[in-house]
Image (cartoon, coloured by chain):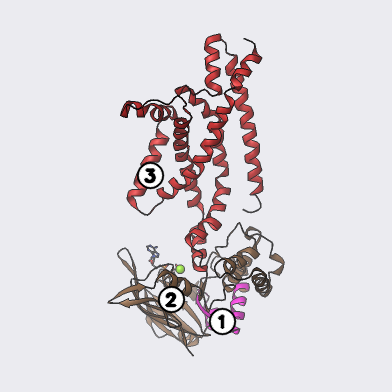
Chain colours: A red, B brown
Amino acid sequence: MTILTMIAKMSEGLGRTCAIFFLTLLFSLPLGMVVALLRMSKNRVVSAITKAYISVLRGTPLMLQLLAVTYGPFYLFGMGVAREKLVPVIIAFALNYAAYFAEIYRGGIESISRGQDEAAEVLGYSRFQCFMRIILPQVVKRILPSVTNEVVTLVKDTSMAFTVAYQEMFTIGKQIANSQTSFMPFVIAGVFYFLFNAAVAFVMGRFEKRLSYYR
Amino acid sequence: MSKLLEINHCRKHFGTTSVLEDLSLSVEEGQVLSIIGPSGSGKSTLLRCATLLETMDGGDLIYLGNYAARDEGGRSVYAPPAELQRIRGMFGLVFQNFNLFPHYSVLKNVMEAPMLVQKREKSEVRAEAMALLEQMGLADKADAYPYQLSGGQQQRVSIARALAMNPKILFFDEPTSALDPELTGEILRVIRKLAEKKMTMVIVTHEMMFARDVSDWVVFMNDGVIVEQGDPREVIDHPTQERTIQFLRRLQEK
Ligand SMILES: Nc1ncnc2c1ncn2[C@@H]1O[C@H](COP(=O)(O)OP(=O)(O)OP(=O)(O)O)[C@@H](O)[C@H]1O
Ligand SMILES: [Mg+2]
């Protein structure tokens, strides 16, 4: 098999790789905020449950979580395993990344000085207005570098989907590597991830620049 | 003269420590009242109760006859949220460390609350905000961001922000304590000008000379109670209570 054929075959999985990447961000970025707010809830039960959720998802491998979400329903309830694995893959990725984003958000929210909420409260801002206008914009700026780190990790983590044989780029590459006893597919995958992350760094750098008008 | 603010039998504790004990205070329209006292005596807690940042355990809190909290059988019962929100429009608070919104320009810091909370016309708010900044000597800083300003300038912006809501009474919690000594003068001058315009103010301060010159009434607090109060010249130059004498002497030694 020529290198070009390998690239062509692996490219068929690119759509799925991108689907994991974008759909995970689409769901986990907002979900992470919900988790962060629950984690900071004054209700002790709510915050304890959320804390446990975060520590389990961050404390166990993403690979296990992928297996659990994809095959768990079969072992637990005897339900069939879906042929199209996009749904369980996205569920596992979104739940996992939401846990990481939640901790980043929480750190960001807690780093905004308490005094600003109080100033807003005395001025008559509702709690929602204060969060949306005063707290959130500053949190976004502060956490951008940490979020960039997670996004870069996500690009590489999309390859984890091979554990459930989801036909994304890396999974296909691995199959070719086995059948052709060639190392080339891994080199191609490496170049691909590197280029993808260069694009991520460029886009995130743009965001950071746009928010650099204040300190 | 009518009573703008009335606090009756206010009690407040944190955990097992009682911070305010049966404290009563009233402020008349146009009056400037200074609160002095040692660290930990409850001055900030009193302002925070008056500005609804803390809830009182017991006692009344009344603005112009409107009850924010009413004592019922020794417990403060607060008015419904809508009423509290209406009452919030009557006062402003200036913090020790300014608490400006760092992601907003100076002008937006001053303009947002009147537009968002009071739903006032943008052009009208802008004109008023510019006039306030002018008054504070900051007209040329309207487009600057807080980090580009000195502490004294930031504090003047925060005073403009509070005034933009047209409060009936303005509270200050040690407005100059976070500033370098050479910058305190500019803030004290601004407050003095407001006093000349008959703005009603309650000022927690450690600046005795200022308190004596600018205020109509001085309250000396210690351990959550008012030990002595009266005409500033009387209280500061001729204190009668042992605790007040000690406090003022120690301040002078510094
Ligand atoms: N949120 C809180 N939780 C527990 N204790 C508190 C809290 N806020 C204040 N206190 C305590 O209440 C007492 C009064 O504090 P407060 O800040 O009102 O004093 P202060 O007169 O303003 O002092 P300073 O001159 O240092 O500002 C102190 O003993 C303080 O430790
Ligand atoms: Mg204080």
Residue drawn at the location 64% of the way across and 41% of the way down: A205
Q: Which residues are magenta?
A: B186-214
Residue drawn at the location 72% of the way across and 67% of the way down: B140
Does residue A103 show up magenta in the picture? no
Does residue B201 show up magenta in the picture? yes
Residue drawn at the location 35% of the way across and 53% of the way down: A43
Q: Are marks 1 and 2 on the same chain?
A: yes
Relative to A30, is B50 above or below?
A: below
Relative to B38, is A187 above or below?
A: above
**Given the image, on which type of amino acid does mark 3 rest?**
Thr
Q: Which residue is mark 1?
A: B199
Pick out the residue farthest to the bottom: B1
Residue drawn at the location 50% of the way across and 87% of the way down: B233
Count of labels in the image: 3
Q: Which secondary structure, mark 3? A: helix
Q: Which residue is mark 2?
A: B247
**Around disc 3, counting alpha carbons within 10 Å, would you say few (fewer than 14), some (14 to 19), or many (20 or more)?**
many
**Given the image, on which type of amino acid does mark 1 rest?**
Met
Pick the residue in front: A99 or B154. Answer: A99
Quadrant where the N terminus of chain A is found in the figure: top right
Q: How far apart are the alpha carbons under marks 2 and 3?
A: 50 Å
Pick out the residue farthest to the right: B140
Q: Which secondary structure, mark 1? A: loop
Mark 1–mark 2 CB contact (< 8 Å): no
Q: Position of residue A188 (x, y in %)?
A: 61, 19
